[in-house]
Amino acid sequence: MKASDLITSNLRELYETDYLAWYETTLEIIKSRCLDELDLDSLSEVLEDLVRDTKRSGASFLEQIIRHLLMIQYWETEREYNYRHWAGEVVNFRNQLEIDMTTNLYKYLKDNLNKIYQRSLKYVIVKTGLKKEKFPEECLYTLEQLIDSNWFPSVDE
């Protein structure tokens, strides 16, 4: 058994018992360019999780933005009392989404906008008690509008 195999084996054990120590050790291995010592299986798993979590987080923030915009636009009986709260939530979720926004995340959100809209719509229908027919079947907002810090849908008073 080569020394690098022993190190990789020990890294796998460390990954299972102390992920923070595994992260730190892996980072040091990468910085020192001793790439043959990497635990590639665990590193691959971590990167897959990171990609999935970043997509999930971005989709979740976008879903929250859509929910609140739908309530602003369609929940007329509550709009006067809740508008500022809902608008504040939109600003907050846009800010959070902006932190993680990359070209790839943008593409993922654009490709999945209607699916995210459908999840948002289910929530808003339950929350508001409004009929599904009151809302558009497909998202009328573009991704550009949804992430634009100054854009809000027009509201007929």
Image (tube, grey):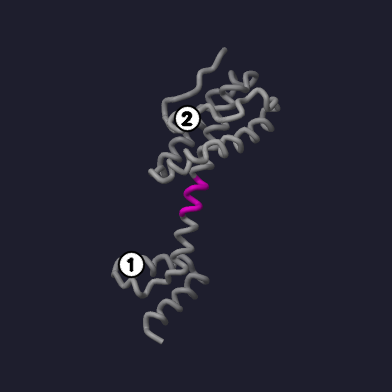
Q: Give the labeled residue for mark 2.
A: 142
Distance between mark 1 and mark 2 Cα atoms: 40 Å
Classify residue 70 as left or right of residue 43.
right
For the C terminus, the image quarter is top right
What range of the chain is rendered magenta?
A: 51-57
Q: Residue furthest top?
A: 157
How many badges with numbers are in the image? 2
Q: Which mark is residue 30?
A: 1
On whether residue 29 falls in the magenta region, the answer is no
- Looking at numbered disc 2 in the image, what kind of residue is underneath it? Thr
x, y percentage for residue 10? 45, 78
For the N terminus, the image quarter is bottom left
Q: Residue at x 61, y 38 (%)?
A: 119
- Looking at numbered disc 1 in the image, what kind of residue is underneath it? Ile
Q: Residue furthest left?
A: 32
Where 30 sits versus 157, above or below?
A: below
Please identify the quarter of the rendering in which residue 25 is found: bottom left
x, y percentage for residue 129? 70, 27
Taking depth in this image into account, of 109 and 125 the one nearest to the observer is 109
x, y percentage for residue 78? 63, 21
